[in-house]
Image: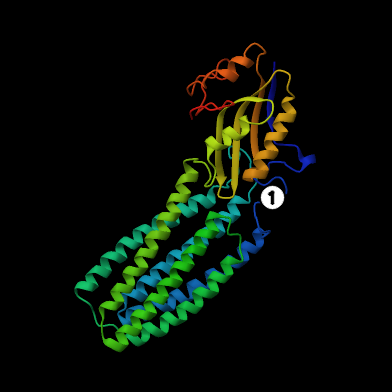
């Protein structure tokens, strides 16, 4: 005998799934509303775009690649913030039609596009910097210093604005990290300008540009890697699926867990599904509620789908003492399982 597929819909206990927003969790871990996110991001965007336009003109006038590279980085900052605003609006749309999770992954598309743009732009800036190291142009150091100092102030203000938004979102956190990277770049540019003014060493400008390139590569790689893991439905950072499976099968009444999947719908919406076998005399509904509470408290996973079945009475003892089968061999319960089978006691994953 078996129970039907059970879902985490028990709103009376406060653990409705809401696509990762159940259990009193509204998707914003520190209580920032979506409207507040848009407001703070819009202010930061206006600051960045306004200063970027001024910096491009001064960069060409001063023949400073460091300023131009900073402006190019600010352009990616502006694009990332604009994409974040669009993604927030799309992600807020309810699930309907063929989009059963809604458009929550719009923010991940935004983060991926932003990371790839950073990587490509860093390659171009690195090439330009190397050319200027070989044959440095005359740089107006005074303009570089003044502009960089103003840029530091603007970036501090923009970073503060974005820090007020919901940084649990990969989208918003990506924009925040970009602003910080830009801030470090302006500090490097200011130092280069001082060196040019005091020593006449024009190559300091290109060296500062290479410093910005390294920061851009680091930020771009981080965004591409994080968004790529979500697209490939890897387990959320900090969650070991094997450890999770062993934890579930170690609960009272559970004799086997297979087809265990844990992934992220979006950067702040982890989800879990699994097929759970319980002893014939066990209360499958109580076991399900206990497992849901366990993963909610230990891993903050509120979107769960657990299929709970009773194991045939003649097979319970065999399951407890025989080694776990290879993936794809879970007896009569699943013809095609995915991943390891978890059973009580030591076993290979």
Q: Quadrant of residue 214?
A: bottom left
* Residue at 50% in and 20% down: 325
Q: Residue furthest right?
A: 12
Mark 1 neighbour density, 10 Å: few (under 14) some (14–19) many (20 or more): some
Task: Please indicate whether residue 250 sits to the left or right of residue 131 in the image.
Answer: right
Closer-to-camera residue (20/74): 20
In percent of width and height, residue 305 lies at: 64, 33
Picture colour scheme = rainbow
Residue 223 pos. (x, y %): 45, 54
Q: Residue furthest left?
A: 134
Q: Is residue 142 above or below residue 315?
A: below
In this view of the protein, which residue sits in the foreground, 296 or 88? 296
Q: Is residue 111 something one can see in this rendering?
A: yes
Is 217 displayed left or right of 110 in the figure? left
Q: Is residue 50 above or below residue 248?
A: below
x and y, in percent, of residue 330 in the image: 54, 19
Residue 119: which quarter of the image?
bottom left
Residue picked out by circle 1: 25
* Observer-nearest of 8 and 243: 243
Q: Residue at x 43, y 50 (%)?
A: 225
Tag 1 secondary structure: loop
Residue 14 x %, y %: 76, 43
The number of numbered discs placed on residues in the rendered structure image is 1
């Amino acid at each position: 005998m078996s129970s039907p597929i059970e879902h985490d819909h028990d709103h009376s206990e406060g653990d409705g799934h809401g696509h990762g927003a159940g259990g009193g969790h509204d998707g914003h871990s520190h209580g920032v509303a979506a409207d507040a996110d848009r407001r703070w991001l819009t202010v930061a965007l206006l600051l960045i775009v306004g200063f970027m336009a001024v910096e491009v003109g001064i960069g060409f006038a001063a023949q400073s690649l460091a300023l131009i590279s900073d402006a190019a980085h600010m352009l990616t900052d502006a694009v990332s913030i604009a994409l974040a605003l669009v993604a927030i609006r799309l992600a807020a749309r309810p699930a309907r039609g063929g989009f059963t999770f809604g458009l929550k992954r719009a923010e991940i598309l935004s983060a991926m596009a932003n990371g790839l743009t950073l990587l490509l732009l860093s390659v171009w800036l690195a090439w330009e910097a190397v050319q200027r190291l070989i044959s440095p142009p005359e740089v107006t150091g005074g303009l570089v210093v003044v502009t960089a100092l103003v840029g530091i102030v603007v970036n501090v203000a923009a970073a503060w604005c974005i820090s007020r938004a919901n940084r649990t979102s990969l989208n918003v956190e990506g924009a925040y990290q970009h602003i910080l990277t830009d801030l470090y770049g302006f500090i490097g540019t200011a130092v280069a300008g001082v060196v040019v003014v005091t020593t006449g060493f024009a190559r300091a400008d290109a060296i500062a540009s290479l410093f910005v390139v390294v920061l851009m590569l680091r930020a771009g790689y981080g965004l591409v890697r994080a968004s790529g893991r979500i697209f490939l439905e890897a387990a959320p950072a900090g969650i070991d699926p094997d450890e999770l499976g062993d934890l579930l099968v170690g609960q009272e009444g559970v004799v086997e867990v297979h087809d265990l999947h844990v992934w992220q719908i979006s950067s702040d919406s982890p989800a879990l599904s699994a097929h759970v076998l319980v002893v014939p005399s066990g209360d499958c509904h109580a076991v399900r509620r206990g497992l849901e509470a366990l993963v909610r408290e230990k891993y903050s996973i509120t979107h769960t789908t657990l299929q709970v079945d009773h194991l045939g009475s003649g097979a319970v003892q065999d399951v407890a003492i025989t080694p776990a089968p290879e993936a794809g061999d879970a007896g009569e319960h699943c013809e095609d399982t995915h991943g390891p089978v978890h059973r009580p006691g030591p076993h290979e994953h």
